[in-house]
Image (cartoon, helix red, strand yellow):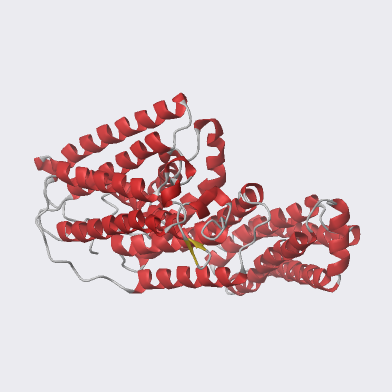
Amino acid sequence: MDPKQRKAIRLVVGLLVASLSMSALFALLTLVFRHDVLIYQQARHPGADPAALDRTLWTRPVPVLALAVLYVWVTRQLLAGVARGYRRVRIISAAGFVAVAYLLLSGEYPGWMRGVQTVQLLLLASLIVAVNRPVVRSAFPAVPDERPRNRRAAWLLVLVAPLVAELTLGTIPLRTAWVLLVFAPLYGGGALFLREIVRRTGGGYANLLLMGVAYGVVEEGLVLQSLTSPHLYHAADWAPRLFGLNTDYTLLNLVYHAVFSVTIPVVLVELCFPGHGTRPYLRRGGLIATGLIALAGAGLVRLAVPPSEDPGYTLPLGAVLGFAAVALGAGGVALRVHLRPADALRPPRPLAVALTTGGAALLFFGLAWPFGGARQPLFTHGTWALLPMAGATAIVVLLVYRMRRWSAAPGWTRAHLIAACTGALAAHTVFGLLGQADGALDRGFLGAVAVLTVTLGWAAVHYRASPEFALGDRRNVNLSQ
């Protein structure tokens, strides 16, 4: 590294340190003058809840400070001449500029504090210019990364997950299909992130299902607050509540998210790219970015849905801690525990597999999902509601048991796996057509989706079952793994 390059890198490091110092100063000022800031914000939003403003006070400066703290890490890599460190400085400087610009333009802080933000924004702009100078770039020549990745598979999973979870069930009517954009970062980013960490730890579909349960606890319990809310979606009227938990709604959604929000989208994409197998689609930087996108998506849904659909309800602290513990526990087990192979049972033909998963899905939804938003009076609050819940639970247990044994047999192939997904997907769309569709347009759309699902699924089954694709078709299809 020649003297010009060293001098240019020292300038970049100086700007990094200066930007970090300004972030720390802004966070400190927010702490010291907290009451003044809240008075200013209440004057700008006279109808806002003071408690809500107090809770959200730190949602702006803390992420900016956390982003700035990363500068310490990348600075060491930069000084050591690590090319990855240089790339990370470029990414973090741009992200920091966007975050600080948002803070400044939002006008949520007094004028004298916006002066600090202006200085920090100028420092970040200078950093972006300095780090992209040719003399700095020449000090970190690009090194080809030979690690396998599959961007097309990753993007397909990001697209498929929200479509399967929301649109093809009819929970979002076509007239408000734009709402899918609000949920897409959480569903797409979440499914991709979970798939990557499960596959990196050697987990299989069983681990993915359990990770899907953890995902359901986070989305429904912590983000939407629907597992405990007495008002949202009328979930409290579905069945008796236990310790403040909407029991039937919890059963339905934890199973649904595990199967339809996470596992089936992952299975479908892996079937589309069989040559890539179970290897990760992303490298480490992509994995981190995906996790951050999923986290941002959770924040977006939290800000968009509960305040409008369930105003005034705040999740109790005990529930927050409980849901967090359950999600972490389920996730930890999913990453560390691997099931032993099940006793093999000769699988039936793919058509019988599709009929089995489709029938099980229809029965499960029929027992766990009340038509019209609530059960009939006989099943609303009394213990009678526990009977259909028990039936729905039994269906899930029996299907998982049978699928594990079928998939452990030598005769289980990708054709069977495609048939299983086709049956479940078609049944879940048919149920949406019967119980969720709002108007002729939505019924026609869901009917077309169901027909298309069966047609494409059955064509794929025959394609995979043809003799030229029979050899080697046992790879990555055992559900016990």
Camera-side residue of 468 and 262: 262
State the quadrant of the C terminus. bottom left
The answer to whether residue 365 is left or right of residue 188 is left
Q: Is residue 146 visible?
A: no
Camera-side residue of 377 and 395: 377
Q: Position of residue 30 (x, y in %)?
A: 81, 68
Q: Position of residue 383 (x, y in %)?
A: 40, 59
Snapshot quadrant of residue 425: top left
Residue at the (52%, 71%) spot, across then down: 322
Q: Position of residue 407 (x, y in %)?
A: 17, 57
Q: Is residue 178 above or below residue 398?
A: above
**Total of numbered circles in the picture?**
0
Camera-side residue of 34 and 81: 34
Snapshot quadrant of residue 34: bottom right
The answer to whether residue 46 is left or right of residue 173 is right
Q: Is residue 409 visible?
A: yes
Residue lying furthest right: 112
Snapshot quadrant of residue 193: bottom left
Residue at the (61%, 75%) spot, across then down: 76
Residue at the (44%, 33%) spot, across then down: 437
State the quadrant of the N terminus. bottom right
Q: Position of residue 150 (x, y in %)?
A: 38, 51
The answer to whether residue 151 is left or right of residue 319 is left
Residue at the (50%, 34%) spot, across then down: 173
The answer to whether residue 21 is left or right of residue 402 is right
